[in-house]
Image: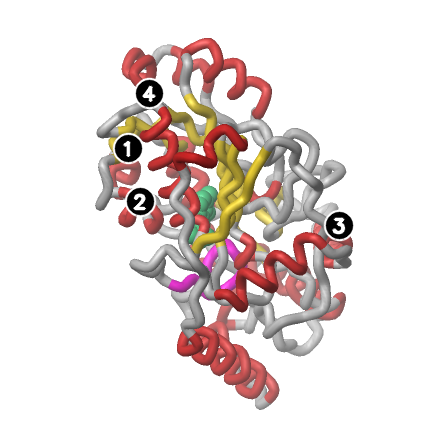
Amino acid sequence: MIVSPVHFPALPPISGGSVPLPQLSQRSSYAYERGTWAMLEGLMAIGKLRDKKVLTVWFPDYFCAEPLELFKQFSINIQWYPVTTELHPDWDRINAMDQIKAADAFVLVHYFGFPNDLEHAQEFCRDRSIALIEDCAHVMVPFGAVGSTGIISVFSPWKFLSVPDGGVLSTHQSMSQYVTVYPSIGRWGRWGRWLLKRELQRVCSGMGMNWFYYRQGSSSAQGEAQSVVSQDPSPTWLSRAFIQRTMIANSSIATIRRANFHDFGRRLQHQAVVTPLFESLPDGVVPLSFPLRSRALAQPIATALVKQGIPATCWPRLPEIVQNNVQGSSGAQWLSTHLLFFPIHQHITQKQIEYMATTLITVCSA
Ligand SMILES: Cc1ncc(COP(=O)(O)O)c(C=O)c1O
């Protein structure tokens, strides 16, 4: 039986939860407006360290186009390496790529908060004197070796916490002389608009309006409405203060997200229409969302689910060059057309999880 549609909250204004940030020895952290800015400033620092006017950086081809728009404005030569449909770097094909020898930096993404091939990437980069960058935009806080292995690692706490902006760059302390740091700013308009949107969402949903249907297109795999990267790298001081406070204090966010992940996964067992991308939840992982592989194309399913009030999403647009590389980027293209993402954040209730699972099975079986 399908329970009646329920309101799905996005991350609302400041909630009480927080997470411990393990002390990273010999590393420094800096706040920026977004993870995109944190990455850019980290790349610039590597450029200074290596005394390079143009930095050649290899990104996985399963990557969203938006951050690259900013990088293109700077002296960064973007190259692509293929990923498998399991989201790992396709090492056999990468090893066969002659041009990778000229790489300055290699970006490893820990997709959706799950550790990627860190040891392999570290060895690969060490053997070729390439700087390893850990893209932890989907990782809430560093854990194990995740987030503290790359010469820089980049976090995107605004995706996990109730704030409109906030990216963090973590570097080896030896890099600090090369990092440009920006003061945090007020920008109350941004906070005001964000709070207004959250309130509007709460009121509309309370009146039974399907918020996500009307906002279609503005949500993403991050489970939150994506704002456009600003031209200003500074974080707002309120976001920065909140991120600092919540990342140091103790938290229930990780526990709730993990419990929601297990709950949703359990409800999808014993059916053949969708398969979880990750079968288990290793210790330390705080999932960004619940990714599922769909047998059919994901977009029509997401559209049907949004009509039912469920904020299911697909991966944001791939870079054009990847989209056009039908053979070379077949893994990324398959992932972008067949993965669906479901919110399991700290404000989702059990009832909503039950509704998501039953509606998903019904829509996919139709
Ligand atoms: C893998 C990955 N890296 C980096 C970014 C950029 O992070 P932010 O949204 O904080 O700018 C994103 C954002 O969508 C992402 O998915």
Q: Provide the residue designation for mark 2.
A: 68
Q: Disc 3 and disc 4: Cα gap in Å?
A: 39 Å
Element marked by disc 1: strand
Magenta-colored segment: predominant secondary structure? loop
Q: Which residue is mark 3?
A: 262
Magenta-drawn segment: 220-227
| Vertical position of residue 146 compared to residue 73: above or below | above
**Circle nearer the N terminus (4, 1):** 1
Earlier along the polypeptide chain: callout 3 or callout 4?
4
- Residue shown at the point (48%, 82%) measured from the top left: 196
Q: Position of residue 128 (x, y in %)?
A: 41, 11
Lower position in the chain sequence, tag 2 or tag 1: 2
Tag 2: amino acid: Leu
- Residue at coordinates 36% horizontally, 42% vertically from top-left? 40
Residue type, numbered disc 1: Ile
Name the spot of residue 74 as percent of width and height, x first: 24, 41
